[in-house]
Amino acid sequence: MLHPPQSGLVKLPQPMALFNNIDSEFALTEFYRNGTFIEQINAQNNYIQHYTLVGISKAFKEVNYYTPQIADSFKVNPLSRMKSGPLPKKALDAIFDKIEADLVLVLEGYDASIDANGQVTYSAPVDRSYGTVRVPYFDGSQTVSMTIFFRIYNRNGEVLSQSQVSDQLTSMASGESPQEVHFNMPDEASMLEQTALFVGSNIAKMVSLHWRDVQRTMYLYGNDELVEAGNLAIKGDWPQATDLWFELAGSDREKIAEKASYNMALASEMAGDLDLAITWAERCIENYDSRLAKSYLEVLKQRSKDLEPFKPYLSSKN
């Protein structure tokens, strides 16, 4: 497994602020018991949405070493709801007037549900002084599901990204009575809060520069120098490996040059330079008609395309 840097939306030190503009009238938390709807419990929705922003902020701090500004003490018109259109420029100007950032991530939709389920089981027959009985035992589960819709805007009012993120949290408890099960079960508010933190963390991972394991192919054999370079790369010494591959890319032996040229494309991606990686892959195709390079070139072009709208906001070229 290798770790090329993945798509990010944030250019440091131009951080992204976080804002909640969800219309509370259309932000619903529904409570079900054994699959039957019981009631809406919406009193804490703004508080739970705040915890989504807290989850985003904490994850950003861990990944990007800064804490985004949370601006959720006010809202702008029109208020947002799930699947509503983007905010108009006037509304965004009102947000940017009160934040210090070039980008703002706006929560625009919220849905949540709590599903509590219970069942009773009975033991094998047990002898008691008053006769043989089957002792009841109670099991319960509680699942919180949450979906948040968000958009990211720049100061020009352009939507750079939008997505819907969902997560859920399940707790289980047992007891000798329904009351004991209820006592042992985490309360709904704390589970909603924890789920909101999970959703926020997932959002941060979607929109920030971070590392992700991906599979890449590398030539490790061909001659002694390719073996040496491959071993260096495996050990994490990519600069030394790259120096050897660069020299081998000019080899008179066509197969050695082909393999080294392909590995140079990989080394360039690992260094975060997608443009250079594409150049090496194209060179490998042009000079050697490499099928492996053709496949890799498509991967590189897709990554470059995914990053294109956000390049002005990235801390490096890629």
Image (spheres, rainbow, N blue to C red):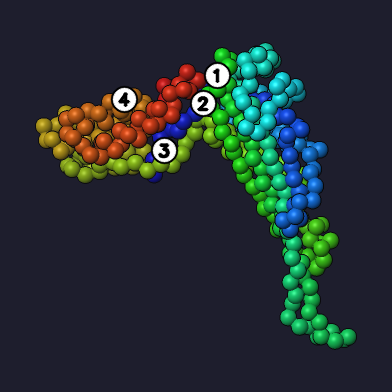
Q: Secondary structure at mark 2?
A: loop
Q: Residue at x 72, y 52 (%)?
A: 115
Q: Quadrant of residue 78?
A: top right
For residue 9, the mark is 2
The tally of labels here is 4
For residue 210, the mark is none
Q: Determine the residue located farthest toward the right in the rendered image.
A: 130
Q: Name which of mark 4 and mark 3 comes first in the sequence.
A: 3
Residue 244 appears in view = no
Q: Name which of mark 1 and mark 4 comes first in the sequence.
A: 1
Q: Name which of mark 2 and mark 4 comes first in the sequence.
A: 2
Q: Is residue 240 left or right of residue 26?
A: left
Residue 191, given in percent of the width and then of the height, sits at: 72, 46
For residue 276, the mark is 4
- In the picture of the structure, the residue carrying the numbered disc 3 is 3
How much space separates mark 2 and mark 4, taking CA atoms?
21 Å
How much space separates mark 3 and mark 2, taking CA atoms?
18 Å
Q: Is residue 207 left or right of residue 39?
A: left
How much space separates mark 3 and mark 1, taking CA atoms?
31 Å
Comparing labels 2 and 4, the label whose residue is closer to the camera: 2
Q: Secondary structure at mark 4?
A: helix
Q: Residue at x 74, y 42 (%)?
A: 29
Kind of residue at badge 1: Glu
Q: Is residue 85 left or right of residue 2?
A: right
Residue 9 appears in view = yes
- In the rendered image, the vertical position of residue 143 relative to residue 77, given as above or below: below
How much space separates mark 1 and mark 4, taking CA atoms?
29 Å
Kind of residue at badge 2: Leu
Kind of residue at badge 3: His
